[in-house]
Amino acid sequence: MKPPRKDALVALSMFRRQRRHSSVPARIAETPVVVVEPSAEPVENVIPQGVRTAAGWAWRALVFAALVWGIGWLLSEFSEVTVPLAIALLLTALLSPLVRRFKRWNWPPLLAAAGGLLAMGLVVVLIGWGIGSTAVRQAAALVDQTVAGFQALMQWLAGDPLHIDQTQIDQWMGSLTTWISDSRSLLAGYAAKVGTSVGHFFAGIAIATIATFFFLADGEHMWKGFVGILPQRYQESTDAAAHRGWASLVSYMRAQVIVSAVDAAGVAIIAAAIGVPMALALFALTFVVCFVPVVGAVIAGTVATSLALITHGWVAALIMLGGTIAVMWLESHLLQPLLLGRAASLHPLAVLIGIAVGATVGGIVGALVVIPVMAFGVAFIRHLRGVRDDDPERKRKH
């Protein structure tokens, strides 16, 4: 049998291809093809990108502000506990170098913490004893000087330009006596509130003392227990950042002690030079209140100037006022940039705004704790960002 010819094979393949194409339904073959061409003009976005970015930052800022407000409200609601704990943390930062030295001498932790608190208590008792002994020795002279100052004030009021005679003063005193007699219930309510506040004050001192003792003795273990609650991937970085923030807080408290001591010494020296009594008391008052930035300086200067006015007249008061202003100027322009600024790494404007916000939110206590909190927070965030203490860029900028 002969093999098929080549032209026959070609005809057979064409016949099969024709049958396969003819089996496709007509509706599929006749389906129209729609080609969508892209528009030549892009669709314009209704909201600009800048507005969307600003809106994103705005709602995040509102959420952050609500969080800060909520934390402040919660702390204020439990202020009888949170305020003593805040004071305890500051005292712990102040006493921790001394307690750490005791521990290096192989003292047990509880004994080292008790030794630190005892040292602080001895300092307070010595200052109180000095103030008390000075007050006892100078009490008679202070009374005589106060009476003489009051008489001089009355003579000044009776002279030019006020011409306020004794009759008008007696009328004012009579009105004041009548108002006190008519407001006994109101004054009794105020006295009850003051008594309650005094009780809360001593209870807060007890809480702060006990908390300081345990923070000094077992603070590291407490912190490790808190860090252990966090997720594993955050524990190491959080612990390192907190240690750096604590070191900054300790440096700030050490620098604040030096600044307060210099301010107190300056005010006491000026008071002693012009013969103002209770110079040691002024030293103690100035040392304590200067832990509150700006506000403490105003309080110390007001008390010192008033005491000089009562005991030695307006010339001594002006000298005391000028000397106090000079001491505070030295603090703000020399001591704070060299000591506090280096310890906390905060700009003076940031310190001023922080004090204003802290005083608005928490009063005197808020003004007291806001700068240490800022110092801790700045150091904490810088460590998380990877900024080191020996970073030359940080030294150049700060």
Image (cartoon, helix red, strand yellow):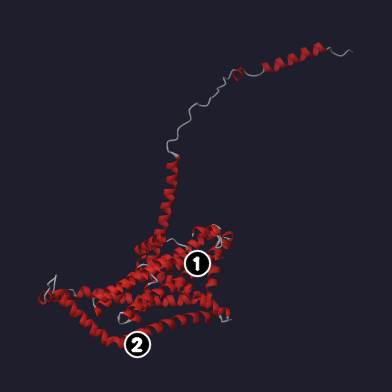
Image x and y of residue 238, in percent? 55, 62
Q: In the rendered image, which residue does mark 1 sit on?
A: 248
Front in this rendered view, residue 323 or 235? 323
Q: Quadrant of residue 168?
A: bottom left
- Furthest toward the right, the residue is 1
Q: Please tell me whether residue 353 is drawn above or below residue 154 in the rendered image.
A: above
Give the residue type at disc 1: Ser
Residue 90 found in image quarter = bottom left
Taking the spot 34% from the left edge, 66% from the top edge, the residue there is: 363
Query: At numbered mark 2, what does the secondary structure look like: helix, strand or loop?
Result: helix
Residue 103 in the image, given as x and y percentages of width and height: 56, 79
Q: Is residue 135 left or right of residue 185?
A: right
Q: Position of residue 7 (x, y in %)?
A: 80, 11
Q: Nearer the viewer, residue 354 or 269?
A: 269
Q: Is residue 191 shown to the viewer in this render? A: no
Q: Residue at x 54, y 80 (%)?
A: 102
Type of the residue with mark 2: Ser
Tell me the tag on residue 133: 2
Q: Residue at coordinates 70% horizontally, 18% vertically from top-left?
A: 20
